[in-house]
């Protein structure tokens, strides 16, 4: 629930508009989560960068993208079941 009298008091104290105070409150509530996620990701990068057991991500993605459907199809020889 919005406390409009609180905003009016804060407006006078800060010398700003109520619109500015509302925008600031929205930024604090919703954009703060983005900053927390960013900090968490940066912390993970800091942890993961010294691990030698992690594979190269580019090579890993290429391995996942290699298409072997045709080979599997030929191996199963599904054409005889038609």
Image: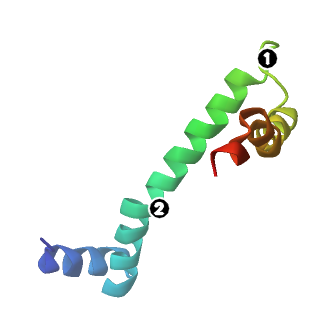
Quick check: 15 above or below 52?
Answer: below
SS type, badge 2: helix
Q: Nearer the viewer, mark 2 or mark 1?
A: 1
Report x, y in % for residue 10.
Answer: 26, 73
Colour convention of the picture: rainbow
57 on left or right of 16? right
Identify the image quadrant of residue 53: top right
Please state which of residues 56 and 80 is positioned toward the viewer in this rendering.
80
Q: CA distance from mark 2 to mark 1?
A: 30 Å
Q: Which quarter of the rendered picture does the N terminus lie within? A: bottom left
Q: Which residue is mark 2?
A: 31
Residue ID at (72%, 48%): 79
Badge 1 marks a residue whose secondary structure is loop
Camera sees residue 17: no
Q: Given contact means CB atoms under 8 Å apart, are the residues at marks 2 and 1 in contact?
A: no
Is residue 79 shown above or below 45? Answer: below
Q: Relative to 31, is 56 on the left or the right?
A: right
Kindly identify the residue that appears in the image at 85 percent across and 40 percent down.
62
Q: Earlier in the sequence, mark 2 or mark 1?
A: 2
Crowdedness of circle 1 by 10 Å Cα count: few (<14), some, many (20+)? few
Question: Relative to 5, is 26 on the left or the right?
Answer: right
**Horizontal and vertical percent for residue 23?**
40, 77
Instruction: Determine the residue positioned at 58% across, 41% down.
Output: 39
The numbered disc on residue 50 is: 1
Q: Is residue 40 visible?
A: yes
């Amino acid at each position: 629930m919005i406390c409009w009298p609180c905003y009016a008091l804060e407006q006078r104290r800060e010398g700003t508009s109520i619109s500015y105070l509302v925008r600031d409150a929205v930024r604090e509530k919703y954009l703060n989560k983005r900053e927390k996620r960013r900090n968490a990701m940066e912390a993970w990068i800091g942890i993961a960068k010294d691990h030698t057991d992690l594979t190269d991500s580019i090579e890993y993605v290429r391995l996942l993208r290699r298409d072997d459907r045709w080979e599997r199809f030929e191996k199963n020889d599904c054409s005889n079941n038609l």
